[in-house]
Image (cartoon, rainbow, N blue to C red):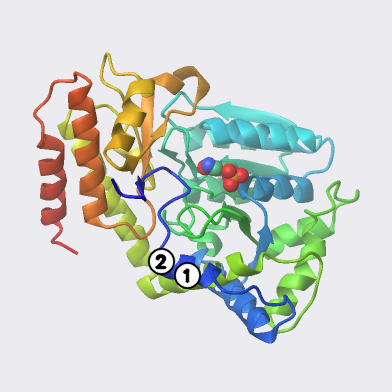
Amino acid sequence: MKSHKLLMIPGPIEFDPAVLAAMSVPTSSHTDPAFIQTFGEALQKMRTVFQSPNGQPFIVAASGTFGMDVAAANLVEAGDRVLLLNIGYFSERFGEILECYGAQVTQIKAEVGNRPDPQQVEEELKKGGYKALFFSHVDTSTGVLNDVPALARLAHQYGALCVVDGVCSVAAEELRMEEWGVDVALTASQKAIGVPPGLALWMVSQRALEARRRRKSPVPNYYGDWLRWLPVMQAHEASQFDYFATPAINLIRALNVSLSQIVAEGIENRYARHRRMSHVFKAAMTAIELDQIPVSEAVAAHTLTAVRYPKGIQAADFLPRVAQEEVIVSGGLLPPIKQEYFRVGHMGNISFGDLIGTISAIERALYSLGYRFAVGSGVAAAQRAIQENGVA
Ligand code: PMP
């Protein structure tokens, strides 16, 4: 038995040893010039990773939900109308957050496994009066991918801000924030960013910052007011110190290492590698005749795969059985179908070997629980998918 099982869930992910090593050093003062430099470098690299050279990056000690919370708190005033696209569990959460701040929320809810048609979104936006359009890039509960460029274009056309929950997409799914006109994109450290949980990261366009400045009522959230953090972020990018609340020093050191790896890989290469890992894994699931939650490949995320159990296989048996094979995968999350599927994350610096190991663990678990199929056919399909592109 290994002491460490392979963590193949849709976040937290497997972290690179160099990232973990960066955390295991004595904590410096947050006023230490070397740390200020590290913080500033991490902010600059965010511009590359989010493809937002003129946006304003923020790094704050919190989880991804906080990024959602403050996007709503800063942009919405009581009574504002917003449009929310609902593709699963985290879209529901965005709705609850928006209501907390008094927004009048209209939802377009897609069928499970699907995403709203941009035409339907346009018909709603056309009615006018929407301050912002909110949606998740990838909903981690369903593995569905939204069409960000089409949605951002529509938001702009109808004068609404475009806010993207990118917790399960940033640094893995294609996201060209500035080119596409996304106003806010937020994420958390523990997914494709590749750092243990504890940091919320978000990028804000100048247009969204302006909307925050123009609001009439104060932001009803102390720790989350963008304008309290703005001078801190600007100072660190200019290699200067400023304080609002103590930063997560060791996590930010680790973040700078991970962002350096991402930038060194090249963001385009990273998108392509995630598409490829997704293709390999999905090909294996298809070969062992398992269905997926997304209704088609076109609407499926590349950061995770949501797979239906074959008849007779229960989550309560399957998940611990896979864990016995030294691999951790996740159960379902969306309440009405929670027991019907499992989720596998394939983000970050994992290898084809990790993917093959995961597929083979899933095959062994399914077979031992009574599912009959051609054992090895998933692994073979994955090997073929890897060979088709040449071995990286
Ligand atoms: N949005 C999405 C799409 C997510 O996947 C998650 C976490 N799984 C969140 C928001 C919430 O992030 P956190 O758990 O870091 O608060």
Q: Which mark is residue 17?
A: 2
Kind of residue indicated by mark 1: Ala
Report the front residue among 55 and 228.
Answer: 228
Work out whether 97 lies above or below 11: above
Q: From this viewpoint, is residue 47 visible?
A: no
Q: Quadrant of ligand 1?
A: top right
Residue 272: image location, x then y, percent: 31, 59
Disc 2/disc 1 C-alpha distance (Å): 6 Å
Q: Are marks 2 and 1 in contact (CB under 8 Å)?
A: yes
Q: Secondary structure at mark 2?
A: helix
Work out whether 240 lies above or below 351: below
Q: Secondary structure at mark 1?
A: helix
Q: Quadrant for the N terminus, please.
A: top left
Q: Residue at x 32, y 57 (%)?
A: 350
* For residue 252, side relative to residue 351 (left or right): right
Kind of residue indicated by mark 2: Pro
* For residue 347, side relative to residue 205 (left or right): left
Q: Residue at x 63, y 75 (%)?
A: 39
The residue where tag 1 is placed is 21
Q: Residue at x 84, y 57 (%)?
A: 214
